[in-house]
């Protein structure tokens, strides 16, 4: 923390946009994700659930999304637009309840839901043990470079409660000093 005094966990804002960016960025580089996101943002007046839900799958594909990601993104947008996903209720819900609501959406797994908890809701005690960057950083910092599995990291990370999001953030910074912003 002393090495990165002016870098802190910050909200990425709108929950829909946070989740949409997560879907766009799945399994592609940060640079590619930014390029696809830029094309998507140009395809609509504003990146909002109603606008994205109205786009045809072909139009989403022309932005650079795969067929599957196009379906995921449109499904997410429809669920927000229809009120099935009510992000305004999330602050009153516990972490596991928010995760359960989100993983019911196609294309959103636990990791994506945890990123929403961290970057949209700024929840302080999220430890995304499935995150490869976190596992790599913990391996280097605490396990002499030996591979650390999710259960092992979960047990080790218990000592950081109730600030596991903060620990995660700084472990990420140990690998990449500048936060990824796509």
Image (cartoon, rainbow, N blue to C red):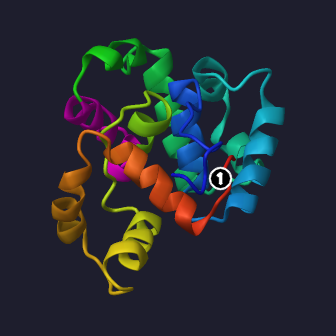
Q: Is residue 111 magenta?
A: yes
Range covered by the magenta-colored residues: 95-114
Q: Is residue 141 above or below residue 77?
A: below
Q: Residue furthest front?
A: 2
Residue 106 in view, yes or no? no
In which quarter of the view is residue 52 placed?
top right
| Front-lying residue, 95 or 110 | 95
Q: Secondary structure at mark 1?
A: loop
Residue identifier under label 1: 180
| Front-lying residue, 46 or 94 | 94
Residue 31 at x, y percent in the picture: 75, 60
Q: Residue at x 31, y 51 (%)?
A: 127
From the viewer's perspective, tell me whether residue 150 is left or right of residue 70.
Answer: left
Q: Is residue 52 above or below residue 166?
A: above
Residue 47 at x, y percent in the picture: 69, 26
Magenta segment's dominant SS is helix
| Front-lying residue, 6 or 57 | 6
Q: Is residue 160 above or below residue 138?
A: above
């Amino acid at each position: 923390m002393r090495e990165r005094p002016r870098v802190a966990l910050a909200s990425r804002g709108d929950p829909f946009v946070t989740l949409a960016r997560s879907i766009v960025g799945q399994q592609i580089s940060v640079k590619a994700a930014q390029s696809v996101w830029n094309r998507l943002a140009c395809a609509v007046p504003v990146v909002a659930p109603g606008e994205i839900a109205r786009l045809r799958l072909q139009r989403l594909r022309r932005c650079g999304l795969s067929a599957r990601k196009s379906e995921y993104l449109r499904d997410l947008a429809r669920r927000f637009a229809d009120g099935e996903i009510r992000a305004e209720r999330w602050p009153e819900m516990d972490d596991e309840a928010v995760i359960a609501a989100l993983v019911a959406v196609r294309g959103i797994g636990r990791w994506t839901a945890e990123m929403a908890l961290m970057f949209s809701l700024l929840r302080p005690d999220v430890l995304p043990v499935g995150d490869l960057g976190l596992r790599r950083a913990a391996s280097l910092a605490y396990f002499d470079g030996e591979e650390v599995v999710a259960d092992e990291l979960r047990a080790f990370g218990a000592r950081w409660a109730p600030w596991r999001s903060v620990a995660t953030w700084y472990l990420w910074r140990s690998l990449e000093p500048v936060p990824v912003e796509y």
